[in-house]
Image: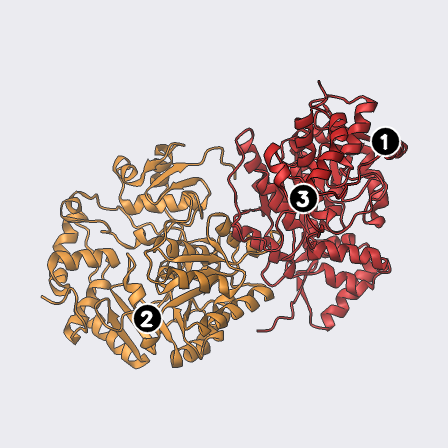
Chain colours: A red, B orange
Amino acid sequence: MTEASPGRLSEEQLVDWLRLIRSENVGPRTFRQLINRFGGAGAALDALPSLAARSLRGRTIRIATREEALREIEAARALGVRFATTGDPDYPPLLREIADAPPLIAMRGVSWTAQRDGVAIVGSRNASAAGLAFAERLARSLALENYVIVSGLARGIDAVAHRATLETGTIAVLAGGHARPYPAEHARLVEEIAERGLIVSEMPIEWEPRGRDFPRRNRIISGLSRATIVVEAARRSGSLITARFANEQGREVFAVPGSPLDPRAEGVNDLIRQGATLCARPEDVISVLAENAGSPPRKNLFDDDSLEGQDTLIDELDLFAGLDGSAFEERAAPKQFSPPSPPADCVADLDAHTRGEESPQRDAHEVILSLLGPAPIAIDDLIRVAGLTAREVQGVLVELDIEGRLQRHGANSVSLILNYKL
Amino acid sequence: MTEASPGRLSEEQLVDWLRLIRSENVGPRTFRQLINRFGGAGAALDALPSLAARSLRGRTIRIATREEALREIEAARALGVRFATTGDPDYPPLLREIADAPPLIAMRGVSWTAQRDGVAIVGSRNASAAGLAFAERLARSLALENYVIVSGLARGIDAVAHRATLETGTIAVLAGGHARPYPAEHARLVEEIAERGLIVSEMPIEWEPRGRDFPRRNRIISGLSRATIVVEAARRSGSLITARFANEQGREVFAVPGSPLDPRAEGVNDLIRQGATLCARPEDVISVLAENAGSPPRKNLFDDDSLEGQDTLIDELDLFAGLDGSAFEERAAPKQFSPPSPPADCVADLDAHTRGEESPQRDAHEVILSLLGPAPIAIDDLIRVAGLTAREVQGVLVELDIEGRLQRHGANSVSLILNYKL
């Protein structure tokens, strides 16, 4: 029986693998245990109904049909998406190492990209111009060291990290399926990444991402990466979940510090306080990775109660997680599956999505305000990241000047004076 | 003989103490050793000429005269300045604990202020608005916890910290004498501090501060404080010296992080990378101090090569530092006193005073360079094999430090950084 470590699957084997992983309550851990117990996906599918009936005291679980699997394979082909299992030579080697490696991933683009070591750069969607500029510099410098930049396709830091490395190699991990990249405004970026980089998803091709899919997705971002760098993050940002996964996976965690008066720095400063390595220049990352090349995973950084309310959500993926011969029968059926609350960041992300995006042309004043922080930023960079004309930006800066909210540093650099009160 | 722990000194004893500490080449360590060896300042003064003659191979040192001491006492009285020795009940208890505690300090203001625990807040002179705002918030919050805020009267962070705590208790430590507060523009601030807080100086009343007096002064700032917080600091800022002293004194070191794109954050981010505790809110400091109240001094934070080029300069204060009965006679005489280069920050501060103080010690520099290599060597050994004085060697090491060519391994051992390019 070669199915448990299958190399490339036959079409029939792929159908079975897809049916099994797409079945209700079967997550990565359950999948692996079922394969180990029954010797293959086909046998596991045969056994699943009675297994579930016993375990769930009569309630049945939905098992994906052969037709559904074939439809997904068809849809994947139409999009140029290929599947890879953990046994496939195309499967990303770093991702294969993690505890909850997806048994099956769908990849679009240059799959060779994921054979190289990744470094994840993640952070705020509403990042400051300084944060965006730093993320860009970081991404470019790491690309020069031959690292692939991994991120989550979100607005802000993620998008800048991808865009800076379109030519050198970047991987975007989706929270939904390949037919539903999120956010919609990055449809064109997705195409650009697919041309020379890679898009990865473990979800069904047509899956519309929900809030709770984002934290789950984040383990793949960190899993593809030897290090995760958080550039700007408010206190409950989803980026902190990626950092936590990275740490649990024995990967390096870096955080870029910021002024305590900037709320966008609260999460990263917390990370540093908890033991993440401070990253103030690309060399901070490069030297640590060079030092640790080939060494065993590092020890756990975080205290038990760090990142409160942001515990890893992976246990929730699997109804049967941790099951073994004896424990399986004893496990009580959940009366009702109650998904953990997604972190505020994801909700905010999806709220915008479900409410319909804000008008794409936000007020220039607002755009500039959101980009400015206490750290000085070159006006040229501000113009570039704002996507506004020099005239528009200068106009807003003059307004801010008049309002007493702008600090000028020489001729070409500005920062925001924070309205701070004791 | 009670003079060695004198309580309040008689006027005659004060004259002797002043004469001894104001004599050439007598710093805090030498002072203490002379007192211990001869039983009192008067006896030490009697012995000093022959002691120096033997040690310095005929060169004499200038011993302060009785008239000078009386004049200083007079000048102090006119300014409302009182002297306190380490044995005096008015002497600040935290300062008394440090290795290089000044034997005699001159205080102006409410001396009771220094009986309370201090927290030092130091940082850039050209601080950002955010940095100033944060320093102010920090100072006020710590004042609410009954801490006295200690700083160095400089423009920027120092001045904000003092001003925020004029009502609740603040201590300014001068690099020069009480008649020469620096910078001159803070003359009025000095008066305000003297009203309800305290001004402290170890220097002669009329002493005009030079560049190298600032690092020396900084040990008193940290020494008066249970913790030192650096708010903004460029890479070679004098504030980092205060942090280093704090660490050597077993006190807590905090640094307020900033954006990597802000040069004013380079020094503080470095401190955090080296192990200083990140401070993003007053509670970060308050909780650590509450936890550690009464516990033994913490371990050394910094790596050997931390704060390159900013090693403590206190060894330079004392010609006879580390002297004991046997070593004293064997010690070679210095040919010429070569002051260590002050850190860049101090130079900027005092460029008017220090310019033209070029070191003529080229040969010592070359000797040391030829003796140093990539393998660490004990400074004591270096002194011995170089055939130079401790002072000469330390002077050269500081120069190499500042040139970025020296690596420090713990307090007592150094190596040369190779492949050094300018």
Residue tagged 2: B206
In this rendering, do the residues under marks 2 and 3 share a single chain? no
Could you say where residue A157 lies in the image, as x and y percent from the top left? Answer: 71, 49
Comparing A105 with A416, the one in front is: A105
- Going by the numbered disc 1, the residue's amino acid type is Arg
Residue tagged 3: A121
Are the residues tagged 2 and 1 within 8 Å (C-beta)?
no
Could you say where residue B250 lies in the image, as x and y percent from the top left? Answer: 35, 55
Q: Within 10 angstroms of label 2, few (less than 14), some, or many (20 or more) residues?
A: some
Which tag is nearer the camera, tag 3 or tag 1?
1
The subunit carrying tag 3 is: A
SS under mark 1: helix
**Which image quarter: residue B399?**
top left
- Going by the numbered disc 3, the residue's amino acid type is Ile
Tell me the tag on residue A66.
Answer: 1
- Determine if residue A269 is in view: yes
